[in-house]
Image (cartoon, helix red, strand yellow):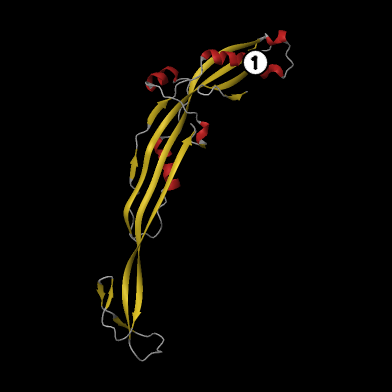
Amino acid sequence: MKEMPPVPEKISKRKVIVYKSRVDPTIVKLTAEKMKYKLFGKFGLSKRKAEEIRVVSVDKYYEPYTLIDARYNIRYFKKRIYTLDVDSGTEEVKILGASYVPEPVSDAAGESEESNKAVTLEAELWSSYDDKAYLVLDKEGKEIPPDQVPAAPSEDHPEKILKEFGKKSGAIKVSSRKEIDMVKSRIAKRPQNIDQIEEELFNISEHAVIYSPLYEITFRNVRTGEERVIKIDGVSAKILSEK
């Protein structure tokens, strides 16, 4: 079988989207005041001791996610040879307007004294295959459920926001090409033993890095020096983690 060319690609340029924060800083501070009792309450804090708990920092940063919407399709055929046995007196065979002259064939078993005839037909078996994928990856390049990333309006000047919060924000640790290859290996599955490809394309229609706002609040027991940290989603105000 002849060697097939690489799978053709159509890749959209990766764009950057920064979500607007929907959570007012005042709400974040109120949440922080309520959380300190929960975070340190298991140690049996009295009201007097609770006053020893201070909010030492409220930091805003952005967590990056990668979104990829991809599709793969191929239309191809495989060649097959079919032999049609005909009567020995047949001079011509017509199939869908095409004319074929049968050729004598030998009887390998030697059971017949008459010479047999057959027509050899070459056919193209056409097929197609289509698959798609919608993936969301975290900054480590691991796939996560799409609903884990909140939906929000985007900032008009994302570069300005990232410049301001870039040092605190996370960074994508996987190259754009590696992301593409990961999705491609999942859906661009070219069938085996193809004789010819009529159409084929691996298409990424959307490729974006979404930066979603987060607030990280650090609490400290001023007497013991012990600290606790919580993270609040800047879009939904949901508490994501505490430690």
Q: Residue at x 63, y 15 (%)?
A: 34
Provide the secondary structure element on which disc 1 rests.
Answer: helix
State the image coordinates of residue 86 (x, y, percent, origin top left). Answer: 33, 81
Q: Nearer the viewer, residue 25 or 108?
A: 25
Q: Residue at x 63, y 18 (%)?
A: 228
Q: Residue at x 32, y 55 (%)?
A: 197
Q: Nearer the viewer, residue 211 or 2?
A: 211
User: As shown in the figure, which amino acid type bears the numbered disc 1?
Assistant: Lys
Q: Quadrant of the C terminus?
A: top right
**Residue, far bottom:** 113
Q: Nearer the viewer, residue 28 or 81?
A: 28
**In the image, residue 54 above or below residue 197:** above
Asked which quadrant contains residue 55, the reply is: top right
**Residue, far front:** 96
Please name the residue that numbered disc 1 is placed on: 36
State the image coordinates of residue 203 (x, y, percent, origin top left). Answer: 36, 43
Residue 205 in the figure: left or right of residue 52: left
State the image coordinates of residue 41 (x, y, percent, origin top left). Answer: 70, 17
